[in-house]
Amino acid sequence: MRVLSVDLGTSNTVAVLAAHGRPPRVVEVDGSATMPSAVYCEEDGTLVVGRDAERRARLDPARFEPNPKRRVDDGVLLLGDNVVPVTDALAAVLRRVLDETTRQLGGEPLDEVRLTHPAQWGPTRRNVLLSAARLAGVNAEVVLVPEPVAAASHYASLSVGQALAVYDLGAGTFDVAIVGATQSGFTVLAEDGLPDLGGLDVDQALLEHVGRQVSHRDPAAWQRLLRPESTADRRARRTLQEDVRAAKESLSRHAHTEVPMPEPFEDVLVNRSDLEALVRPSMMRSVELLESTIRSTGMAPNQLAGIYLVGGASRIPLVANMIAEQVRIVPTSLDQPETAVALGAHHVPKNGVTPRSQEPTRPREPDTVVTKPVTPPAGYQANPAVSGAHPVNPAVSGPYQVNPSASGAYQVNPAVSGPYQVYPQTGPQQFNFPSVGTRPRAGSKKKPDRKTLLIAAGAVVVLVAAVVGGIFAFSGVDVPSAQECKSDTQQDDKGFTECLRLLAGTVPDTSTCKAGGTPGVGGVDGIKGTVVSCAVKDDYSVQYVLTETVIGAQHGAEAVVRSLKADMVEARWAGNGLTGKYRAAADGGLGLLVFTADDLPLLGIVTRSGGEELTADQVADFFEAAVQPGT
């Protein structure tokens, strides 16, 4: 089975291939994991894509469109004096990916092609994507996968009833979706977005900031950069845009950088603080929309399995910081958020998405278009160097046929694609999430009414803990902050640092403890940090781990509980000035409990093996009586 997944993004396209029984891998085009989605139209109408298009743009930027996906509603692009249907532009991008994939397969045909799309795309836009696939020469089965569902499949293995949030900040738009796990797969519980916010808008804000620093030197020259009139002006503008984008990306890694400027201007020094001040209001809109979308499902942020960052622009450190400050959840990202959607599309079952049962409150694009040929106005110069400065499809052109006859009739959702008309459900009443068992805080006299959640069986997730900003500081007199925990590397004779000793409470005084050991059970080896192992009593042992990050502790806990197929109870705990959460599970004679401290990089793992059969409640009772800090 040869399956190709393609994430045709606003700025870049990523393809992932699974063939010959091997794990999915990114298809490198021109030696890179990401290929620019750009198109350039030659004088004879030939379309050039990717990096070749970007190089040709230096010759005549008027023939260049860097972001054809952003023009999906326009119908056509006017590149130079050539009218190019958007379907043809997208097809050219897909064809380049298909050609490279076919070359790497030695000419073998594909069995299935999966195309990802924003969750809020309606039938019209999805029809454009499918028509482009047909024009590109896709003869295999075509499956449409919503981007947030693919991202969720890549980032996390959800149990039935769990949900996570996908924060997708791409080049052209911002999208947020809450994805839940059902018995058969996934459902989009809620989605929303901001069409006017993306990496390109950050580039524009930085460009305007640079202009304020230098435009006084030669206002006329700066105006020519903003509104190029000649080919030389457009080339200078294009070069400046590339340098501004490179500066933005550099500021995600460094505190400051320089933007090279064309004559007669001097180079401009920009700081990360400058960029953050420019984009903070826009980013706050996205974070507030994230929070409101979460709450629209009837869930609180802390009930989610996590918040996951997708899209190249999500690399901006301010994004993670603001989410942590506003939503009080530290988000997760991987080293290459650009590849998450394409990689995740491979793991989504064809029948594993629930269709929308109601229309969302957010307006959608119409499902019909007027199919009338277009005649470009004489002398019209479309597609200036600044994408979006002028309409590509002006009113005088009229609408253009989205699915021209050359591509043939193509159903938006053909039967062979599987049930992928994916829409978010509205309101928690339409998604019956099982309740996780709850227990009272230690010290409560009320016997809890416990419910259980079945942990799905499967391979244990090997975690990649991404280091993101925005570590919270704990309040309280004697409780150290997360940074203090990580900075204090001094260990006592049993291997405990100050923070680990705080988490351990009285256990080191009554048990045999020693430094070292591999954290986790059942093959969980992705947890990194300082480990102390203690043999308690009654065949119970405890491992205390000072992880590298707060989110490393949280996700380490997730990995541990997934390693055992069993019923689980969950509750809050408090002691030694700390608060946190624990989850307990049992299967036969094996008992397991994992506990974390709020906003601290601390993780504890309680295990018991051998002896009589256990229940999750019995393991939890032991923790509260003998292990919980402060007992």
Image (cartoon, rainbow, N blue to C red):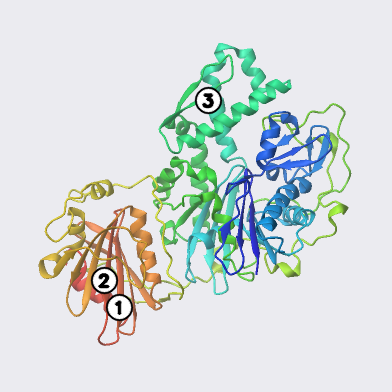
Q: Residue at x 34, y 61 (%)?
A: 527
Report if the CB atoms under discs 2 and 3 are less than 8 Å apart.
Answer: no
Q: What residue type is labelled 3?
A: His
Q: How far apart are marks 2 and 1 (CA)?
A: 8 Å
Residue 209: give its label.
Answer: 3
Image spot of residue 465 (x, y percent)? 39, 55
Q: What residue type is labelled 2?
A: Val
State the quadrant of the C terminus: bottom left
Q: How far apart are marks 2 and 3 (CA)?
A: 54 Å
Q: What residue type is labelled 1?
A: Gly
Q: In this view, does 579 lie to the left or right of 58?
A: left
Q: In this view, does 623 lie above or below 505?
A: below
Quadrant in which residue 317 is drawn: top left
Q: Nearer the viewer, residue 603 or 576?
A: 603
Quadrant in which residue 384 is drawn: top right
**N-terminal of the two: label 2 or label 1?**
1
Image spot of residue 282 (x, y percent)? 52, 38
Q: What is the crowding at mark 1: few (fewer than 14 residues within 10 Å), some, or many (at least 20)?
A: many
Q: How far apart are marks 1 and 3 (CA)?
A: 59 Å
Residue 465 visible, this orientation: yes
Q: In this view, does 51 lie to the left or right of 493?
A: right
Element on which disc 2 rests: strand
Report if the CB atoms under discs 2 and 1 are less than 8 Å apart.
Answer: yes
Image spot of residue 405 (x, y percent)? 88, 53
Residue 314: give its label.
Answer: none
